[in-house]
Amino acid sequence: MFADIFQDLRYAIRVLGKNPGFAAIAVLTLALGIGANTALFTVFEAFALKPLPLKDPASIVRLSGRNRDGVQQPLFSYTDYLDYRDRNNALAGLAAWNKVAVTLGERPLSAGDDLSALSGDYEYIFGQLVSGNYFSVLGAEMTLGRAFLPEEDRTPGAFAVVVLSHGFWQRRFDADPNIIGKTLKLDGQPFTVVGVAGRDFIGTEPDAPQFWMPLMMRDQVIREGGWNYKRWLTDRDADSFALVGRLKPGISRQQAEAEISVIAEQLAEASMDRHRKSRVVLSRAATFVEINAELMPLVVPLLVAVGLVLLIACANVANLLLARAATRQKEIAVRLAMGASRWRIIRQLLTESVVLAALGGAVGLLLTVWMLSALYPVVMSQLPIPRHLAESFALNLEPDLRVFGFALLASLVSGMAAGLAPALQASKPNLTSALKDEGSTFGAHLSQSRLRNGLVVLQLAVCLSLLIGSGLLVRNLQKVETIDTGLETANVFAITAGLETPQPEPQREPIESE
C-alpha cells in the first residue's frame, strides 16, 4: 500500500514537473485562498486559542455582573470588590484593575484632559491601576525588583510606587539594570520604580500596559472631578474596576459563579436598587477573547466570507484540472485498457491535486507570514486610536503548531475538493475513441460538461456575493464618515489652558523623559 502511494507521489511530481506553467498557476491560485484563510486563523488563534503567558491560565476567570433586567455590567465598585474577595471560598485570589493614561514627565496644564485629547508636547503612556494582589493572582514573575507589598494597597496616596513592563523598560530606559529605586515623573508626580515585570507578562488584555501602579494612587492620576474621583473608595455605585480571579484547585467555574452570585444577590437585596448587580458571570480568561454566543454573529460571517475565497480557489483549480484531463485522455485510456482499475486512476489524479494543494499550502503559509508582518502595522496605524495605544498591542502572530496544522488541513481539504470531481469524470472516458486518438470525443464531452458549467456558475455566484457584501460595507463606511451630526465642524479648533499651581520639585532626581 505504502509502495503504491509512494509511486503515485513520484509520478505526480514528475507529471507536474513536465507542466511547470500549469503547476505554477494552480499552486498560486490555491496559495492565495489558503493564505487568506491561514492569516485569518492566525489572528483568530492569537485572540481566542493561544493561552496567555500566565501561570496555569486555565484557572484564570473574568467576572462580569448582570442586573435583574439581564443588562451586562462589566465593571465593579471597590466596595463590591472587597466583598467578593473576602466572602468567597471558591477563588484562590481576586484582583481588581483598570486602565489609565498618564504623562511621562510634567503634568499637562489643562484640567480637562482626557483620552480623547491626547495631543501637545507631552509623552502619554498607558498603564493599569491594580490591586496589590494583582501579580500574585496572575502568577507573574519579575525580571527585576518586586511586585507590590500588601501595605501599598491600603492607604490612599501613601505609596507612589510603580512596576514597569519589560517592553517599556527595554524601549524607554534601554534595559537599565539599575532602574530599581529610581524615580520617574508620572503626571508631574514622582513615582519610585520597585519592579520590572517578566518578559512575557502583559496581563489579560492584548494592549500591553507600560506600567502598573497601586489602586490607592488612583486619585493622584485621575483629575479632580474626573471619573468617580474620590467616590470610588466608599460608594457602591462607583463602578470603576474590572475583576479577574483564580479558581481554587478542584473548583469548577460553575461552582464559583454560583457562590459569587449569592453574594451579589445579598448585596442587591441590601441596597434595594433593581439596577444593582444580582448575578455574576465568570468567563474563561485563559485567552484574550472567549468566543461566546454574543460574539458568534460577528465571527461567523467573517469566517464564511474568507472560506468562500478558498472555495473560489478550489473551483478555479478544479476547472484547470478538468481541462488538463482532456489532454490526458489517451494516457488514461491506455492505463485502463492495460488493467488499471478506475479507483487506481482516481487515486493517481487525486494524488496530483493533493501535491498541488500541498505546494499551495507551503506558499500560502509564507504568504501568511508576509501579509501579517507587512499589513498588521499598516492596519494598526490606520485605527482611530492614539499612536501609543496602537503600539502597545502585543499579539503573538508567529506561526505555531496550530497554524501549521490548519495550513496542512486546508491544503488536504483543498486538494480533495479541487481534484475529486475532475478525477471521477476523467476516469470514465470512451476507451474506443480515446485509444483511436479521437481527441474531439472527450473534448466535446468536456465542452458540454455539466460539471464545468456548474463550477463556473458556482464561481460567479460566490464572487458576486462577496462583491455585493464588500460594496455594501464600503458604502456604509463612506456614509459613516460623511454622516450629518447636526453640528458645524468646519474651522473649529480647541484651546486648552491651565491655572494649576506649580508643584514643588521632588527631592530625588527624576529620570528625564526624552
Image (tube, rainbow, N blue to C red):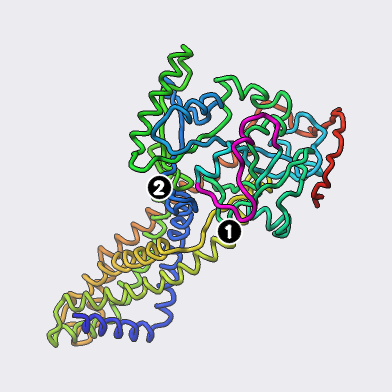
Front residue of 75/244: it is: 244
| Residue 397: x %, y % from top left | 51, 59
Magenta run includes residue 142: yes
Residue displayed at 43% across by 71% down: 362
Residue 269 vs 184, above or below: the answer is above
Dominant secondary structure of the residues highlighted in magenta in the image: loop
Image position of 183 (left or right of 427)? right
Residue density around tag 2, few if under 14, some if 14–19, many if 20 or more, within 10 Å: some
Please report the residue visible at 32 percent of the width from the left and 72 percent of the height from the top. Answer: 354
Disc 1 secondary structure class: helix
Q: Position of residue 92 (x, y in %)?
A: 43, 39
Question: Which marked residue is nearer to the observer: mark 2 or mark 1?
Answer: 2
As helix, strand or loop, the secondary structure at mark 2 comes to helix
Amino acid at dot 2: Ala
Residue range in magenta is: 139-159
Mark 2–mark 1 distance (CA, rounded to whole Å): 32 Å
Q: Quadrant of residue 261?
A: top left
Q: Where 392 sits versus 425, above or below?
A: above
- Whether 466 is among the magenta residues is no
Residue 499's place in the image compared with 478, above or below, is above
Residue 335 location in percent, x, y?
Answer: 18, 85
Upstream in sequence: badge 2 or badge 1: 2
Residue 382 visible, this angle: no
Residue under label 1, please give it.
375
View extreme (left): residue: 339
Q: Considering depth in this image, is 339 or 164 the residue closer to the camera?
A: 164
The answer to whether 374 appears left or right of 184 in the picture is left
Relative to 269, say whether 411 is above or below.
below
Kind of residue at badge 1: Leu
Which residue is the extreme one toward the top? 272
Residue at (52, 65) in percent of width and height:
369
